[in-house]
Image (spheres, grey):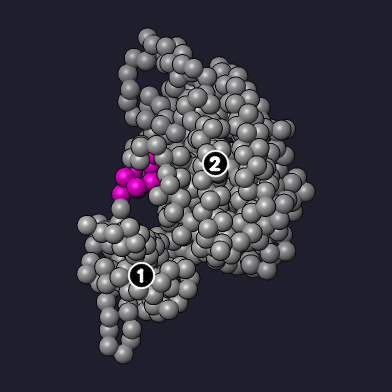
């Protein structure tokens, strides 16, 4: 039986091995590439060199890396054996797999944020109305596209139903754009940090991500100007409303500047607006799409954050020619989004129920945001900095102490606390943490922050 010290060392070596696998799976370390030395890894991950040695031995046994005479330790494999050796996300990252875990990482809302029986009420309205469920038109169920167009018009972004493509969630929208519109070798410009760094849709198709600096008003135009020149291949991806992970709300003037730059420099813009409806203080400025006279903006939204992620309903709005192209690509992928889900969504959006539903959701999120603010102020006011967002449900916490976030993550997980380290959302180093107040209850959020404080103090000594 392992002693307490041996058990802790084993956990740390497993963590180091898992981190190295993540770098390979993400494409940061390619086959044949020499990995950093034991000394560098130990320093970067704030662990003993013996822990790194144990992790490397484990990876060599699994065939992930290999020692080559005169060359050092190289990546040997990044495909089947690596994927098979990675832990299942459902097993290791979801609260259902860990009894009593406090999940401060979850990018969705808890069930008690929504009105009781809200979905059953809509499903009962559909009873008797559905005669058959066959394949829909390529662009999606026509009444749903009409309902989406009407809803966007009420938001201030008028589009025609023929300029809308229904997709199976925003993630599929990204995949269709990447595979159907962009070329290998393209540069995807995006906020630094950004949610897009945490997925690998674009990188897997041979595209690179290039971070653009931000301030409290959103993307910095000067940083964008230095990163892009006309004639390049690529696009700008941005989350202007309640940005993930920072919660930043892009100002109206900044939106106009970014839109003008994109138009004049032939830089296509992908506007991810899935958090727009979750404003908590006042409605956000007009969407980029609503101010786009040149047809340069592709707009993505979804019901996953505001209604139900299980419905898998999202949409892309753009010029008819672009939507036609994406519709063809989608048909090759899945022959259309679920007919039943599309009918449920159409019922919500077409009858005005959605706006009423959002009022309830916003009221509940305001209560949770206030409780989260009090908890952070009570426990971390002298250890970190943060800005309370005006919408959405993410708080970007920046630690004052130069501690290892990887160690903090491991120790917090051992304590039953799950959060997202900032390194997920950036290519550089980060001393930030993304916290969600939308999933854990206010009492759970406070308990999680209280436990995290203990480890932040311990690791900073």
Point out which mark residue 51 bears.
1
Residue 238 position (above or below residue 289): below
**Within-10-Å neighbours for mark 2: few <14, some 14–19, many 20+:** many
Q: Position of residue 144 (x, y in %)?
A: 49, 26
Q: Nearer the viewer, residue 85 or 145?
A: 85
In three-dimensional space, the C-alpha distance between marks 2 and 1, rounded to whole angstroms, equals 32 Å
Q: Tell me which numbered mark, 2 or 1, is placed earlier along the sequence.
A: 1
Task: Tell me where residue 258 sits by quadrant.
Answer: bottom right
Which residue shows up at 33% across the image and 58% down it? 4
Residue that label 2 marks: 436
In the structure shown, which secondary structural element does the residue marked by tag 1 occupy? helix
Query: Which residue range is magenta in the image?
Result: 88-95
Number of marks in picture: 2
Residue 168 position (above or below residue 74): above
Q: Nearer the viewer, residue 251 or 42?
A: 42
The answer to whether any part of residue 132 appears in the image is yes
């Amino acid at each position: 039986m392992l002693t307490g010290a041996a058990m802790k060392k084993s956990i740390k070596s497993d963590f180091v091995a898992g981190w190295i696998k993540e770098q390979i799976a993400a494409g940061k370390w390619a086959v044949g590439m020499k990995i950093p030395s034991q000394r560098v890894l130990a320093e970067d991950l704030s662990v003993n060199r013996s822990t790194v040695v144990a992790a490397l031995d484990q990876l060599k046994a699994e065939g992930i890396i290999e020692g080559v005479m005169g060359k050092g330790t190289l990546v040997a494999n990044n495909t089947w054996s690596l994927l098979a050796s990675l832990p299942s996300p459902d097993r290791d990252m979801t609260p259902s797999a860990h009894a009593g875990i406090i999940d401060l990482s979850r990018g969705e809302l808890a069930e008690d944020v929504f009105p009781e029986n809200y979905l059953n009420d809509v499903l009962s309205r559909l009873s008797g109305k559905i005669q058959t469920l066959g394949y829909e038109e390529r662009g999606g169920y026509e009444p749903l596209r009409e309902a989406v167009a009407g809803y966007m018009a009420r938001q201030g972004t008028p589009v025609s139903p023929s300029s809308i493509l229904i997709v199976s969630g925003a993630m599929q929208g990204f995949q269709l754009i990447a595979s159907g519109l962009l070329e290998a070798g393209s540069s995807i410009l995006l906020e630094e940090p950004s949610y897009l760094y945490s997925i690998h849709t674009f990188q897997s198709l041979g595209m690179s991500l290039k971070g653009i600096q931000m301030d409290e008003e959103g993307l910095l135009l000067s940083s964008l100007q230095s990163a892009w020149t006309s004639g390049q291949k690529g696009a700008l991806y941005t989350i202007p409303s309640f940005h993930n992970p920072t919660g930043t709300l892009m100002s109206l003037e900044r939106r106009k500047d970014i839109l003008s730059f994109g138009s004049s420099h032939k830089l296509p813009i992908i506007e991810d607006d899935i958090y727009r409806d979750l404003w908590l203080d006042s409605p956000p400025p007009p969407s980029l799409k609503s101010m786009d006279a040149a047809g340069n903006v592709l707009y993505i939204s979804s019901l996953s954050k505001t209604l139900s992620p299980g419905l898998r309903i999202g949409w892309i709005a753009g010029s008819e020619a672009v939507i036609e192209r994406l519709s063809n690509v989608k048909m090759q992928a899945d022959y259309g989004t679920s007919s039943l889900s599309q009918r449920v969504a159409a019922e919500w959006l077409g009858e005005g129920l959605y706006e009423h539903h959002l009022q309830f959701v916003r009221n509940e999120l305001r209560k949770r945001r206030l409780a989260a603010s009090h908890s952070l102020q009570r426990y971390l006011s002298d250890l970190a900095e943060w800005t309370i967002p005006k919408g959405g449900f993410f708080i970007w916490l920046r630690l004052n102490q130069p501690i290892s976030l990887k160690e903090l993550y491991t120790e917090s997980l051992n304590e039953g606390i799950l959060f997202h380290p900032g390194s997920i959302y950036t290519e550089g180093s980060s001393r930030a943490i993304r916290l969600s107040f939308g999933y854990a209850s206010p009492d759970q959020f406070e308990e999680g922050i209280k436990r995290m404080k203990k480890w932040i103090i311990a690791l900073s000594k």
